[in-house]
Image: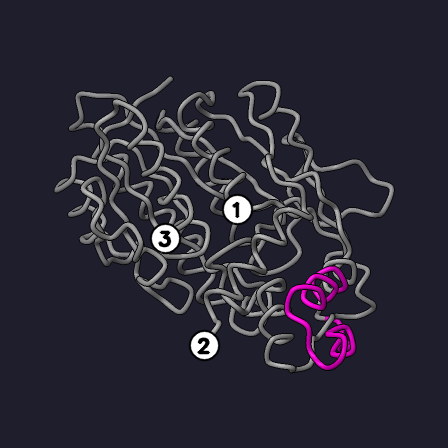
Amino acid sequence: MRNFKNILITGGSGFIGSNFIRILLHDIETSDNKVKVINFDKLTYAGKISNNKDYKNNKNYEFVQGDICSHEEVTSVLKKHDIDLIINFAAESHVDNSISGPEEFIQTNILGTFNLLKCFDNHRKELSSESAFLHVSTDEVYGSLDINESKFTELNSYKPNSPYSASKASSDFLVRAWHKTYKLNTLITNCSNNYGPFQDTEKLIPKVIMNALNMKAIPIYGNGLNIRDWLYVDDHCKGIIKVFRDGAYGETYNIGGLNEKTNLEIVNLICKILDEIHPSNESYSNLITFVKDRPGHDFRYSINPDKIMNDLGWYPQETFETGIEKTILWYLDEYKN
């Protein structure tokens, strides 16, 4: 098991990044390891400093505002904190936004990753200890599956269909190239759809919850039969910890929740739970509204996580039913006023 001393988390004020830091800090506090965690985030619309408020005074944690596209800012934080591990969460991630404005996705997801790799490759030559770069990616790089096709494995070809997934595929290839060409110790994880606390309300599950609580229409693209594999964010974060500690350099690990659901199933289940624990005058399901499908909407994503389960001993702990109830209760508490 590897023990890095100074870990840079890019995008650590976003949804997955902030949850990851929370779990990592707890892991550090329950072990004998002395580790410093540096959160490096630009604080765009999806990165909120409030996501880190419960551990902002933790002695093992520090926040640095910065842009992964800036050579000077990245180089400075690497040197100042003697970083030996980067975990790259920083990304533009909303598919709809990538369709209407792809430029930011090219800038952050491709050029930002390139800048991190270039700066870290230079920096690691000054280190006396082991160093590594872990890149967090998505199942969307694999394209779309038909209903009877096998789940995505790490051997699937890349077939991205949106500007978002194309930008993430490009960044994955850059990470692979820096391992093969420059011998940088790299790891890649590709995850299925995450859900849980602190997710931005533009995403499906929090949007459904918040629209329902505000008695607003709940939009569903097309016929609602598109399928996603859902992964509770804490399970994802624990998988990433397994990968940076024990994963083989140069390898990719798929992290999936083994919870395939149609969008309509998701929405109906959320409405059913809200009807039970936060009843209104009428069922929240009456708010469901079918809207025009988005361009290039992939039909199905499904991750096969056999590799990380067999090689590293990771398994998802949450069923969708337990995870979605925790998520709904968190939003009810967070937005109760």
* Residue at which label 2 appears: 337
Q: Amino acid at mark 3?
A: Gly
The location of residue 180, given as percent across then percent down, is 43, 27
Q: CA distance from mark 2 to mark 3?
A: 28 Å
Q: Residue at x 45, y 76 (%)?
A: 337
Q: CA distance from mark 1 to mark 2?
A: 25 Å
Q: Amino acid at mark 1?
A: Val
Q: Which residues are magenta?
A: 268-293
Q: Amino acid at mark 2?
A: Asn
- The quadrant of the rendering that contains the N terminus is top left
- Left or right of 188? Residue 291 is right
Tags 3 and 1 touching, CB below 8 Å: no
Density class for disc 2 (Cα within 10 Å; few <14, some 14-19, many ≥20) is few
Tally the numbered discs: 3
* Residue at which label 1 appears: 233
The location of residue 137, given as percent across then percent down, is 51, 44
